[in-house]
Image (cartoon, rainbow, N blue to C red):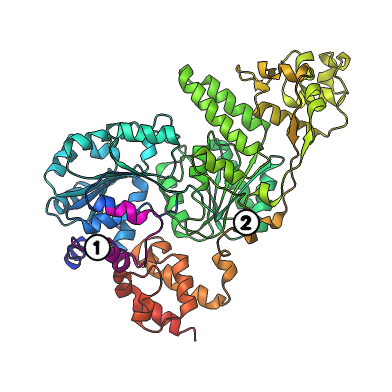
Amino acid sequence: MHPDQDFDQLLAERPTTSGRSPEAVLHEVFGYESFRPLQGEVIHEVVRGGDALVLMPTGGGKSLCYQVPALVRSGTAIVISPLIALMQDQVAALRELGVRAAFLNSTMDFEQARATEYALSTGELDLLYCAPERLIQPRTLELLHGASISLFAIDEAHCVSQWGHDFRSDYLQLAVLASEFPEVPRIALTATADERTRKEIAERLSLTEARHFISSFDRPNIQYRIAPKTNANKQLLDFIKAEHEGDCGIVYCLSRNKVDATAKMLMQNGYTALPYHAGLPAADRANHQERFLREDGVIIVATIAFGMGIDKPDVRFVAHLDLPKSLEAYYQETGRAGRDGKPSTAWMVYGLQDVIKLRQMLEASQGNDHFKRIERQKLDAMLGLCEVTRCRRQVLLNYFGDKLDNPCGNCDTCLVPPETWDGTVAVQKALSCVFRTGQRFGVTYLIDVLRGSENERVLQFGHHQVSTYGIGTELSVNEWKSVFRQLVANGYLRADPEGYGALQLTEQCRPLLKGQQTVKLRKDPVVKKSAGRSSGRRTGSAIKDQITDHAGWEALRACRKELADQQGVPPYVIFHDTTLFDMLERKPKTLDELAGVSGVGAAKLEKYGEIFLATLAGLD
């Protein structure tokens, strides 16, 4: 839908909403009976004119924290969003609710932009979405000064942090809002920020006096699973076939080449898989993103360039084939699963080469020593989550200053507790082998020496004569890979900073080599394939597992898809799966009964009520 399509009609239909209570707006416009935890407090703070810094997990309802105040306070709310590509769908979703919403960005032609600017200046908009680089232009600031502004909402506020994983330099200039519009309340929102990042957001956006609203970071419907990487493609295929056949998902890879290869592999195995990375033409990226948002069962294979701001509620799994650089990145990316609150999986495989590659990238970066020290701490925390033997969710939440008193029961270490073993002798053998071979070789070669291989390279370098040759036959190749992976992850070995993959000893390993310290190692567990969908904690089973009337479900989905295609929006903009499921369960026969279904607000009831009632009547 173009910004000016049906604009006059929308403005004429939509009366001013200023003066209504937040609770009335929530029910009448959005179709919900009550606020989620913390939402109500944030909304009332902003409605009364206070500033707020909001940390709420993905899927926790952050957008309502500014959308509801925008419909209560008089004037237009300005929403700063970093992704132009997603503004159109966000605006389309609001318009479906009868909200007067628009956006200003570089995709618009002159006439479209002028029409939107006129609507802003004449007070005919409830919300206006704007990219940060557009907002800070003098012309835009002048335009805002001539309008009645109800509030500023700064979404994805962690982009202002130079230590964050999504840093955007344009965000640094958003502090101008505090000086240019001192009387207008501002709300900054993010799903990912540790204490250091929260402080930086408050300082850089001049929100040091703002109230902080920090929700629990827990996403209980997401099951966290991390496994050693053996054959990544086969592992991914086995995971999808066993637990997420036909589901929508995201697969993250570190490089563009790997994205392309993985998407091709999935397509060859019968899946609708689309690549997404900065090397693709812009038109292809936009098309792939649109198909992901609007079609069922699409898998996007992407670099970390994909996903920020994605509002698709039914992503059932997020898979990582490479190790993220930090827990912030991991939490942000896995948080794109299960926004509808239904059971979903965050699945990852990682291996020694991931650790080596990331450590080499870090050391080779142009950052100063302070930057590298912080990045090392972040990577160490990420590795700690991978190798932990206790509840992963407790470790993840603790990193963000959140606390879970008891193990979650919905991560792999809870479902299949890993065993540990006394690895002291094996570790001494491994470290000695690194030393005896001159600290010049990678893990594959070192394992060949330990296991007494007679291959040409070992004989060529004369390492069949060192004291560590053949002393490690008690462990398999994969078991030795696990030993070396844990040694690198825990800082006893490091990758050669010159980038050749050789492993080198660190000062930390000295007590181990001298026999002054023992070490427990994690046994890589074999996770049962069935440990996924049925194990959701504090949530029901996935919607498609609860459906008994499959014909009715497909009829409602077909009705929704037809309407979505007519409107040019993703199906979930019409109604979420949870709303369709509620319809199927309740089988409303009148508009009043349909109004009681969660997610059916007044505008959608008027637009689509009779259509869905007719579809439901046809099921009897």
**Is residue 137 among what the camera can see?**
no
Name the residue that disc number 2 marks: 270
User: Is residue 33 a member of the stretch shown in magenta?
Assistant: yes
Comparing marks 2 and 1, which lies closer to the viewer?
1
- Estimate the spatial distance between the alpha carbons at disc 2 and disc 1, rounded to whole Å: 51 Å
Helix, strand, or loop for circle 2? Answer: loop
Q: Position of residue 100 (x, y in %)?
A: 23, 59
User: Is residue 80 a member of the stretch shown in magenta?
Assistant: no
Indicate left or right for 115 with 64 as reference: left
Circles 2 and 1: CB atoms closer than 8 Å = no
Task: Name the one closer to the observer, 562 or 556.
Answer: 556
Q: Which mark is residue 21?
A: 1
**Is residue 617 among what the camera can see?**
yes
Neighbor class of circle 1 (other Cα within 10 Å; few <14, some 14-19, many 20+) is some
Neighbor class of circle 2 (other Cα within 10 Å; few <14, some 14-19, many 20+) is few
For the point 16% across and 54% down, which residue is it? 119
Which amino acid, mark 1? Answer: Ser
Q: Position of residue 49 (x, y in %)?
A: 22, 48
Helix, strand, or loop for circle 1? Answer: loop
Image position of 364 with respect to 146: above or below: above
Mark 2 or mark 1: which comes first in sequence?
Answer: 1
Q: Which residue is outermost to the bottom?
A: 620
Image position of 552 with respect to 281: above or below: below
Indicate left or right for 557 with 346 as reference: left
Task: Name the one closer to the observer, 508 or 338.
Answer: 508
Task: Name the one closer to the observer, 285 or 333.
Answer: 333
Q: Position of residue 554 (x, y in %)?
A: 51, 73
Number of numbered discs present? 2
Image position of 517 with respect to 219: above or below: above
Which amino acid, mark 2? Answer: Gly
Q: Which residues are magenta?
A: 19-44
